[in-house]
């Protein structure tokens, strides 16, 4: 069965970076894009960007350009999302999702807390 | 950047009633629109892709329609488990702000 398993919760100080991993299983990792989406407490879903695991091509939301990097390691079927220059407003649950056009499988979410 | 606007923000209905949710795009997205359901503490669940196609395992009471800039998600008869927040999303792009379907 398709599964996306994300890394555990993180606590970071303002100005630091965080790197969240998303390990895929149950399908061919390079056949579907990976999207990253975040959600602050009580707020809506915010799309951050996508990555094609086969080519490594990426597309980022304008809001995160210059601050987000999405990468992958195909040998271990894992995608990564790194967000730099963290501020308190980046406190949120971060999700990865498999997408063949729409996000049909989601990771369990990773809580990133930014606090001094 | 295309903006998706959902309406209403909140829909108060009783079980058994019909729910009609709207998603309007600031410019055409063709049929590249998906709908998701999210319950508290859970990841979103895909309901509809490419405007009108039900995802695997989604009950027939959920249906999607529309193309271009105007889209609708219809729940024909609300079940207790359908009370949740619903989001639309353009393929590989931003989400709408969500519609909360609450029990009246």
Image (cartoon, rainbow, N blue to C red):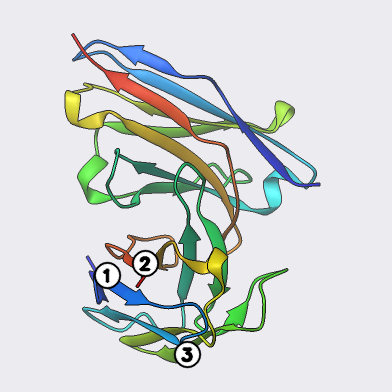
Q: Chain of mark 3?
A: B
Q: Position of residue A50 (x, y in %)?
A: 45, 49
State the residue at coordinates (49%, 82%): B51
Is A60 on the left-hand or right-hand side of A66?
Answer: right
Is B57 on the left-hand or right-hand side of B98?
Answer: right
Tell me the tag on residue B102: 2
Q: Position of residue A32 (x, y in %)?
A: 64, 53
Q: Is residue B73 above or below residue A43?
A: below
Q: Is residue A40 above or below residue A21?
A: below
Read off the residue under disc 3: B65
Tell me the tag on residue B10: 1
State the residue at coordinates (24%, 34%): A66
Camera-near label (3 vs 1) is 1
SS for dot 3:
strand
Are the residues at dot 2 and dot 1 in contact (C-beta closer than 8 Å)?
Answer: yes
Residue B80 visible in the shown view:
yes
Camera-near label (2 vs 3) is 2
């Amino acid at each position: 069965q398709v599964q996306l398993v994300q890394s555990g919760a993180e606590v970071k100080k303002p100005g630091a970076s965080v790197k969240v991993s998303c390990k895929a299983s149950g399908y061919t990792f390079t056949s579907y894009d990976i999207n990253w989406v975040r959600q602050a407490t009580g707020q809506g879903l915010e799309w951050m960007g996508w990555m094609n695991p086969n080519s490594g091509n990426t597309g980022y939301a304008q809001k995160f350009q210059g601050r987000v990097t999405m990468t992958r390691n195909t040998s271990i079927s894992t995608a990564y999302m790194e967000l730099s220059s963290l501020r308190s407003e980046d406190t949120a649950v971060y999700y990865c999702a498999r997408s063949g056009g729409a996000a049909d499988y989601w990771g369990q979410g990773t809580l990133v807390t930014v606090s001094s | 950047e295309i903006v998706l606007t959902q309406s209403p923000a909140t829909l108060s209905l009783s079980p058994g009633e019909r729910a009609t949710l709207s998603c309007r795009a600031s410019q055409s997205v063709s049929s590249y629109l998906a709908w998701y359901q999210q319950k508290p503490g859970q990841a979103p669940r895909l309901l509809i892709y490419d405007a009108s196609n039900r995802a695997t395992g989604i009950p027939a009471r959920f249906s999607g329609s529309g193309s271009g800039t105007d889209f609708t998600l219809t729940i024909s008869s609300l079940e207790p488990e359908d009370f949740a927040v619903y989001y639309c999303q353009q393929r590989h792009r931003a989400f709408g702000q969500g519609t909360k379907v609450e029990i009246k």
